[in-house]
């Protein structure tokens, strides 16, 4: 089952980032197919493919596409989320670098299907080279008549595509914060449905807005070009098609791997050359926000949304990190909590205060100042963040810590009792505060 290259079928073709080579390998056939259908038929094709959003949540793509009003009363917008801030995930980067035309094509298809005339690709600030590749692809697509006015000679099918660079904020990958940032506001999230209208009704500039991940649009291109039936024949009953997994950590061949949904997790490790530097200790399958799974529990897990969920973790964005037995799980969680404390936008109290508390406690433990009751304290802080924060970043900060305590509680206990790492190294000095590096919080708060 393991490797199945659909989106990646042409990734090794020399020059595939240029439009002529892309067209010679079937490029823009998906868009041609789309405009030969009426708009609803395009949405129906996406529906029958079973495609779910690849940005992390796995929401059915067609429901969003179908949710925009079917007229031009107001401008409609198509946005691509290329913020890719989830630690461990780097698939969108490769798609942009090598297959930017597949994204341009997918967004034009979405523009056609949703009566949208403007598209934006929101790219994280660090992705300078991918943004240049996309710039080139967009310019070529305009020249070839795949973007702009009366695309492919279809009267009234107008679609412009713009690039918007972010400034490297993880929170700006959260769709409502992304929209705020795109409009030039501070990158804070907004109220969500049912307390506010859905983006498909009132998104950017209070207009209907579709927002999907890079991989989602690329998959839509493949589906239109090759047919929904072929796509839905792959994968499991509820997780169709393929997923690109970014493999990293203690692994021989870290890279992006496109696998059929439902592929046994351990098969991917084999495909990536196996674990290096020791034996396998644990895997985080879907990016740093999801729960870590110890090696002995990996055998029954498949890479699809349902199987990961049933086994206490998530497929998420596909940021797959493998760890060998020299990994200190508590130090890993300290580094993880530092990231979330740094990236918290500060809008709501549970996340703003809680993420920093998590980091402080973990920093104290790993610098030799752990106290009895610290594990319960960590769990209590997590319980006060999870489900009580304004957006998903708070939950994402709490889940990995709860998961790590559940799976590796003895390592936390060891650190607290012996003031050193259970895997051999000594206590590390307190680290700087993630928000204000001038403070050494654990030293202050011990
Ligand atoms: C804190 C946070 C960060 C996120 N970062 C990203 C991101 O970098 N890229 C992405 O596609 N989705 C990200 N998401 C998910 C988006 O909010 C949204 O669900 C997604 O872009 C929808 O696209 P999809 O339906 O194609 O998955 C993030 C969510 C949260 C809560
Ligand atoms: S959970 Fe709250 S503080 Fe954290 S990023 Fe979201 S809105 Fe900001």
Image (cartoon, rainbow, N blue to C red):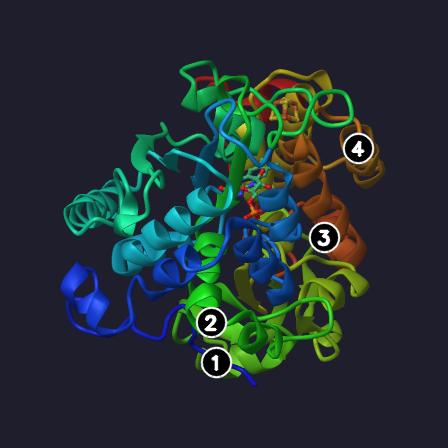
Q: Quadrant of the N terminus?
A: bottom right
Label 2 – label 4 distance at C-alpha? 32 Å
Q: Nearer the viewer, mark 2 or mark 4?
A: 2
In contact (CB < 8 Å): disc 2 and disc 1:
yes
Q: Between 441 and 64, which is closer to the camera in this rendering?
A: 64
Q: Which mark is residue 387?
A: 4
Label 1 – label 4 distance at C-alpha? 36 Å
In contact (CB < 8 Å): disc 4 and disc 3:
no
Q: Which mark is residue 371?
A: none
Give the quarter of the image for residue 442.
top right
Residue at figure coordinates x 76%, y 60% from the top left: 309
- State the SS at label 3: helix
In contact (CB < 8 Å): disc 2 and disc 3:
no
* Residue behind mark 3: 404
Label 3 or label 1, whichever comes before in sequence order: 1
Mark 4 neighbour class, 10 Å CA radius: few under 14, some 14 to 19, many 20 or more: some
Label 2 or label 4, whichever comes before in sequence order: 2
- State the SS at label 2: strand
Rendered position, 312 above or below 389: below
Mark 3 neighbour class, 10 Å CA radius: few under 14, some 14 to 19, many 20 or more: many
In contact (CB < 8 Å): disc 2 and disc 4:
no
Q: How far across and down, in percent of the image, does residue 263 sit? A: 61, 78
* Residue behind mark 1: 3
Label 4 – label 3 distance at C-alpha? 18 Å
Label 2 – label 1 distance at C-alpha? 6 Å
Q: How far across and down, in percent of the image, does residue 3 sit? A: 48, 80
* Residue behind mark 2: 258
Label 4 or label 3, whichever comes before in sequence order: 4
Give the quarter of the image for residue 441.
top right
């Amino acid at each position: 089952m393991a490797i199945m290259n659909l989106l990646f079928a042409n990734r090794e073709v020399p020059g595939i980032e240029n439009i002529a080579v892309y067209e010679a390998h079937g490029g823009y056939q998906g868009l041609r197919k789309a405009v030969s259908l009426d708009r609803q038929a395009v949405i129906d094709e996406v529906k029958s493919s079973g495609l779910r959003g690849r940005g992390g949540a796995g929401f059915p793509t067609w429901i969003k596409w179908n949710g925009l009003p079917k007229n031009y009363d107001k401008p409609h917008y198509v946005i691509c989320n290329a913020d890719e801030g989830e630690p461990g995930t780097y698939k969108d980067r490769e798609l942009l670098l090598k297959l930017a035309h597949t994204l341009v094509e997918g967004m034009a298809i979405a523009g056609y299907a949703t009566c949208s005339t403007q598209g934006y690709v929101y790219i994280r600030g660090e992705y300078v080279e991918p943004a240049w590749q996309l710039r080139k692809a967009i310019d070529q697509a305009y020249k070839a008549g795949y973007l702009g006015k009366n695309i492919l000679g279809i009267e009234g099918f107008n679609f412009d595509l713009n690039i918007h660079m972010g400034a490297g904020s993880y929170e700006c990958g959260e769709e409502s914060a992304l929209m705020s940032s795109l409009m030039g506001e501070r990158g804070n999230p907004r109220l969500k449905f049912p307390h506010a209208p859905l983006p498909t009704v009132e998104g950017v500039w209070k207009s209907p807005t579709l927002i999907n991940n890079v991989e989602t649009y690329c998959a839509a291109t493949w589906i239109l070009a090759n047919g929904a039936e072929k796509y839905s024949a792959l994968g499991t009953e509820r997780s169709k098609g393929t997923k690109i997994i970014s493999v990293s950590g203690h692994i021989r061949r870290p890279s992006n791997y496109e696998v059929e949904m439902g592929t046994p997790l351990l098969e991917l490790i084999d495909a990536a050359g196996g674990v290096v530097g020791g034996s396998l200790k644990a895997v985080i399958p879907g990016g740093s926000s999801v729960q870590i799974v110890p090696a002995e529990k990996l055998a029954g897990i498949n890479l699809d949304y349902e199987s990961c969920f049933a086994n206490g973790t998530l497929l998420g964005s596909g940021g797959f990190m493998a760890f060998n037995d020299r990994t200190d799980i508590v130090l890993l969680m300290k580094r993880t909590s530092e990231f979330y404390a740094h990236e918290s936008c500060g809008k709501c109290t549970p996340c703003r205060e809680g993420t920093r508390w998590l980091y402080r406690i973990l920093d104290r433990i790993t610098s030799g100042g752990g106290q009895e009751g610290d594990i319960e304290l960590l769990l209590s802080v997590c319980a006060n963040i999870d489900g009580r924060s304004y957006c998903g970043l708070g939950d994402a900060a709490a889940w990995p810590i709860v998961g790590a305590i559940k799976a590796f509680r003895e390592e936390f206990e060891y650190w607290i009792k012996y003031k050193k790492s259970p895997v051999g190294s000594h206590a590390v000095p307190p680290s700087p505060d993630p928000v204000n590096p001038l403070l050494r919080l654990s030293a202050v708060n011990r």
